[in-house]
């Protein structure tokens, strides 16, 4: 039996009547066909996700409502109404069309969280091309892998980030043009485009956007989502985020992460909410100030950020007027019970944990204002999604038994494919279940509990990192023969990246000098940071004589992890002598 603390629904300070009045009743009666009237279709079942996010509001008083309150990294502010956002995205659409972009072409965006990122994303979808998003922390290797695999035709970036393209451009024959949004003439060029557009009427299954995400093996995979995903995103924004007309909403996620797409651009705007977007980096005082200044009422963030706020004793919520907050949520990694207790104490509200993945396209398991929270549980499946715990053969396991968290395919935002890798796509499915790669269990009352990843994928500060990418970056350094990379538990970041590195012979003597050894570790960390990504570098490095491997030569990261944690090593029958 799982021992739990409960935050009863009756203690939730309902300031607005929740959209989801009775979880069980809605869950039992929900079907996607019936939910179709939540979004707008053109004739013959055609639709467009970007039209649903923004342009649908132009026929209503929301036309002049503020859609976007943007705060720049240096404190500058700009606002855009739905009407202005629609026009700006139409101008992007024309600009791209003028450059020969066609339906199905991949257009990638590599920008910090500036208004043009959001407008260009919408513009790309409006002409039926496929938007790809790249974190601004990405460096050469990460950019090259993604742009090459996707065959991107256009990259939209700024002058600073475009420097990272210099050395790799020649390896990207499909890339026809790099658009620099802060170049001399860009604003005029964009402004000279028409603000009116005949929006592409796509099939529900036409591709809309793609995001590269990490697994255990190989390079990141291009997860592709179709236009019909907007339905799940809209419905979950309504039922889980509980977005109302009068809300001011802030989702802290970057659109390089699916959360920033589904719940800043698509589902949340489709519900007509005013969104705050902050360009800058995490900083406790700035974050609280943003919540206070903008009267934010719904706040969607992530556990690492919450833990960092909790750890800051000289800057606390009580120093700010956060009285407008009415619903707060967290996603991306396990939300520890202390974080919920902290928020109840500091903000008078519990964080509502919810679970989903790049692949699922929308929140799948969640806590709701009208349901008791079992602190530490991710909640229950959202209406329209069937979730279960299954064994490796796809057989449903009874309550309280650990197994694979699995979802029954069939909700609108389930990934459509893995870009040019049908085999990989098919490998997710067993006995008609989509296996999520996570382990968990269901308790006797139907609440889901997260246990851990079934594979070696690392979650550091909420970012999903594949060990293979980091290992590949490390072995490019001349000192390194091979490397094994794991996620090491960390009280703030959830996990940090730790690398076990086997050095070339000539370095073995040198690292006997501890100063040199420390320097080399620093150098290797920086090397990964510079070549792969600002967030995916090892914070800890250990030099080791030999990596544990299977007889077929595969690195056994599980063993590295068990040793690191002082845990039993488990079955080693497939292991080469170690
Ligand atoms: O392991 C789970 C963890 O994050 C993974 C999905 O990562 P990503 O695709 O980057 O997420 C995008 C949108 C959230 C999952 O397989 N995860 C996500 N939410 C939770 C979580 N782990 C524990 N609790 C959660 N609420």
Image (cartoon, rainbow, N blue to C red):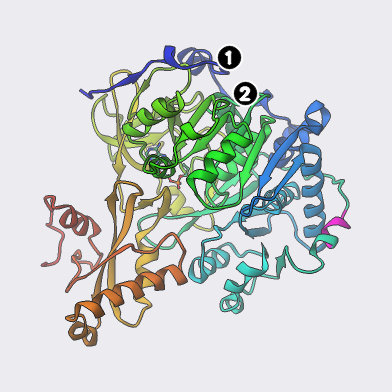
Ligand 1 is located in which of the four quadrants? top left
Looking at the image, residue 549 lies above or below residue 198: below
Left/right placement of residue 255 relative to residue 552 reads right
Which of the marked residues, 1 or 2, is nearer the chain's N terminus?
1
Q: Nearer the viewer, residue 245 or 466?
A: 245
491 or 121, nearer to the observer = 491
Front residue of 23/576: it is 23
Image location (x, y in percent) of residue 178: 69, 68
Q: Quadrant of the C terminus?
A: bottom left
Report which quarter residue 371 is drawn in.
Answer: top left
| Residue 529 lies in quadrant | bottom left
**Position of residue 216 measured from the top left corner of the image (x, y, whole percent):** 35, 56
Contact (Cβ within 8 Å) of mark 1 with mark 2? no
In this rendering, would 304 be left or right of 147?
Answer: left
Q: Is residue 270 above or below residue 567?
A: above
Secondary structure under badge 2? helix
Task: Give the residue drawn at x 32%, y 30%.
Answer: 376
Within 10 Å of disc 2 (Cα), the crowding (few <14, some 14-19, many 20+) is: some
Q: Give the residues in magenta.
A: 189-193
Label placed on residue 17: 1
Q: Nearer the viewer, residue 256 or 7?
A: 7
Q: Residue at x 44, y 33 (%)?
A: 354
Spatial CA distance of label 1 from label 2 is 20 Å
Q: Position of residue 468 (x, y in %)?
A: 36, 63
- Give me the disc on residue 35: 2
Examine the rendering and report whether any part of residue 153 can be seen.
yes
Residue furthest out toward the bottom: 506
Please tell me in which quadrant of the rendered image residue 206 appears: top right
């Amino acid at each position: 039996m799982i021992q739990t603390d409960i935050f009863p629904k009756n203690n939730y300070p309902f300031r607005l009547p929740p959209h989801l009045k009775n979880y069980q009743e809605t869950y039992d009666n929900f079907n996607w066909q019936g939910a179709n009237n939540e979004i707008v279709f053109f004739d013959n079942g055609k639709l467009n996700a970007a039209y649903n996010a923004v342009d649908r509001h132009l026929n209503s008083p929301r036309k002049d409502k503020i859609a976007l309150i943007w705060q720049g990294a240096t404190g500058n502010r700009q606002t855009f109404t739905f009407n202005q956002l629609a026009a700006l995205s139409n101008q992007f659409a024309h600009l791209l069309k003028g450059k020969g972009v066609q339906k199905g072409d991949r257009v990638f965006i590599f920008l910090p969280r500036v208004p043009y990122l959001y407008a260009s994303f919408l513009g790309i979808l409006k002409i039926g091309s496929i938007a790809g998003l790249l974190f601004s922390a990405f460096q050469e290797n990460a950019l090259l892998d993604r742009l090459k695999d996707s065959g991107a035709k256009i990259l939209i970036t700024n002058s600073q980030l475009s420097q990272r393209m210099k050395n790799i451009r020649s390896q990207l024959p499909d890339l026809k043009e790099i658009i620099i949004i802060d170049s001399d003439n860009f604003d005029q060029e964009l402004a000279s485009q028409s603000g009116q557009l005949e929006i592409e009427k796509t099939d529900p299954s036409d591709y809309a956007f793609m995001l590269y995400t990490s697994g255990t093996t190989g390079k990141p995979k291009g997860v592709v989502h179709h236009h019909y995903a907007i339905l799940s995103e809209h419905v979950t924004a309504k039922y889980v985020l509980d977005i109302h007309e009068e809300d001011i909403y802030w989702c802290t996620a970057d659109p390089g992460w699916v959360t920033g797409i589904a719940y800043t651009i698509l589902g949340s705007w489709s519900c007509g909410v005013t969104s705050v977007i902050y360009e800058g980096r995490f900083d406790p005082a700035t974050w609280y100030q943003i919540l206070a200044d903008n009267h934010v009422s719904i706040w969607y963030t992530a556990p690492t950020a919450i833990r960092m706020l909790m750890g800051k004793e000289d800057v606390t919520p009580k120093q700010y007027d956060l009285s407008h907050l009415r619903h707060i949520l967290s996603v991306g990694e396990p939300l520890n019970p202390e974080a919920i207790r902290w928020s109840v104490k500091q903000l008078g509200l519990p964080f509502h944990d919810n679970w989903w993945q790049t692949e699922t396209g929308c929140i799948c398991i969640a806590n709701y204002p009208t349901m008791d929270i079992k602190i530490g549980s991710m909640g229950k499946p959202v209406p329209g999604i069937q979730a279960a715990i299954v064994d490796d053969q796809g057989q449903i396991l009874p309550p309280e038994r650990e197994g694979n968290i699995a979802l029954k395919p069939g909700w609108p935002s389930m990934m459509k494919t893995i870009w040019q890798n049908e085999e990989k796509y098919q490998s997710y499915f067993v006995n008609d279940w989509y296996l999520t790669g996570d382990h968990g269990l269901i308790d006797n009352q139907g609440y889901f509990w997260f246990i851990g990843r079934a594979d070696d994928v690392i979650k550091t500060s909420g970012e999903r990192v594949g060990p293979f990418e980091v290992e590949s970056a490390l072995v490019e350094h001349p000192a390194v023969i091979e490397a094994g990379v794991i996620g090491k538990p960390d009280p703030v970041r959830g996990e940090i990246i730790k690398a076990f590195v086997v050095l070339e012979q000539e370095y073995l003597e040198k690292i006997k000098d501890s100063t040199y050894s420390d320097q080399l570790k620093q150098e290797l960390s920086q090397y990964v940071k510079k070549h792969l990504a600002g967030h995916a570098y090892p914070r800890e490095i250990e030099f080791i004589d030999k990596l544990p491997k299977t007889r077929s030569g595969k690195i056994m990261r599980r063993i590295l992890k068990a040793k690191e944690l002082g845990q039993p090593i488990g079955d080693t029958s497939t292991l080469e002598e170690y």
